[in-house]
Amino acid sequence: MSDVVWADILGYVRTGHPAISRGWFSQLQARSLESGELTVLAANAAQIAYLNEHCGRPFAEAAQAATGRLISVRFVAQKAADARTATRKSADGPLLSFERETSPLRLNGNYLFENFVVGPCNRLPHASCLAVSESPGSAYNPLFIHGSVGLGKTHLLQAICHKVLDHSPTARILYLSCETFVNHFIEAVEKGALDGFRYRYRHVDLLLIDDIQFLAGRDHTQEEFFHTFNTLYQLRTQIVLSADCRPSDIPSLEERLVSRFNCGLVARIDAPCLETRLAIIHKKVKMQSLALAEDVALYIASRIKSNTRELEGALNRVRGLASVAGRPIDIALAQRALGEDETDLSRQIRIQDIMGLITDAFNVKLSDLQGRRRSRSIALPRQVAMYLARQYTQHSLGEIGGFFGGRDHTTVLHANKLIKSRRQTDLTFRSQLEELETALQRP
Ligand code: ADP
Ligand code: MG
């Protein structure tokens, strides 16, 4: 994880949860971010106890807001982490990186079947993964899940692992990304440790490789994978693969691998429809014990159509902004979080800014703007102020009227129309207005 993201996370915690923040938080370190789990290193057991008791949720929320991903957080003490690495090193000699990385199995605790929303877009892949987890090796072998990014392939593969482990806690499961497989292979070749590599990959009860399209163009790894595949297949060991496209569409994938991948079940995940997106939002909101009004959920679901990861990211941005700005989550906040990402809430134009600008520019008093007088010298500044409030703030017509001495919404609407049309016809007025607008938007 980059320092910037880590600094963001700490920033979120400090702003959103000042009561639990402590000075020593600045000494915490982000040790790793893998498979959806952020490991945070603390100096001692006392800090760990404090973090575990008070800070799990705030850190998870902050990590999610900063990365746009659903992340769980684990706190570990510096000493314990060092000791574990040291004993493993001294007992086993130098470890190949794949031994370090593949044991123990790193799974995201949230990627369970129970947390997966089923809809028309993913019914078959979901059902086939469930079947495989219930009877590995006999339902569909291999099972090949494909679909574009962020649609839940990794979630489903990990859900299989969780479920199998629930039934058989000692099952030897190897779940990894294809990239890791490729790196392990290269490392094993370089270190002359191919036997160890083969032993590791061929003595398992379940092999799941995510994003198998990474085999594209890697002839040697493809060759090795072909043999791994055949060995496991003959042993009736369950193999599950995922990719961003069909087997035959993976560029320069050997024909014999394409036909192996096609010989079990190939299931495609499609982008979720509106109902499914809405159900996913409800699920995530429930998992985070968050309250979200129905109109806001619907707004997010209709805005974010491409994939589920972005949907989750959008939800996290909305929540992050609400916590930083200390505002309740409503449509206006959601619009700001999703639409104008880069707009800093602190630079949001407030009605007070408009009042200040108008009183200066027209040399009138605030009490005049808010008062009853209708003389032309005061009516025009008041109308301009209403117009600006309508254009540059999120306030409703009624609210704007309220700021101007309790006038009703039709008055605001009328002012807005009047200024708009005068802007079209009166060039001097227009440039005057533009000057005001520029001043208003100046940071
Ligand atoms: P992929 O591996 O296809 O790129 P992921 O499995 O990483 O996608 O999914 C991205 C995010 O969207 C994950 O946080 C996952 O939990 C969530 N997600 C995807 N599909 C669903 C679904 N049907 N129900 C609930 N969450 C989902
Ligand atoms: Mg994935």
Image (cartoon, helix red, strand yellow):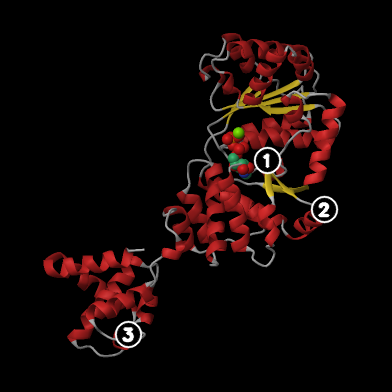
Does residue 215 appear to the left or right of 73 in the view shown? left
Near mark 2 (Cα within 10 A), the count class, few <14, some 14-19 or many ≥20, is: some
Ligand 2's quadrant: top right
Residue 164 in picture, x, y percent from top left: 79, 33
Q: Could you tell me which residue is drawn at 65 percent across and 43 percent down?
A: 116
Lower sequence index among marks 2 and 3:
2
The numbered mark at residue 32 is 1
Residue 292 in picture, x, y percent from top left: 58, 61
Lower sequence index among marks 1 and 3:
1
Q: Which residue is mark 3?
A: 366
Choose between 337 and 189: the one closer to the eye.
Answer: 189
What kind of element bears circle 3? helix
Residue 83 in picture, x, y percent from top left: 83, 39
Residue behind label 3 places its C-beta within 8 angstroms of ligand 1: no
Residue 282 in picture, x, y percent from top left: 61, 53
Q: Which residue is mark 2?
A: 45
Near mark 3 (Cα within 10 A), the count class, few <14, some 14-19 or many ≥20, is: some
Residue behind label 2 places its C-beta within 8 angstroms of ligand 1: no
Q: Give the CA separation, mark 1 to mark 3.
A: 55 Å
Residue 279 appears in the picture as rendered: no
Reply above or below: 419 against 93. Answer: below
The numbered mark at residue 85 is none
Q: Could you tell me which residue is drawn at 29 percent across and 88 percent down?
A: 368
Reply above or below: 197 against 291. Answer: above
Q: Give the CA separation, mark 2 to mark 3.
A: 58 Å
Choose between 281 and 393: the one closer to the eye.
Answer: 393
Residue 401 appears in the picture as rendered: yes
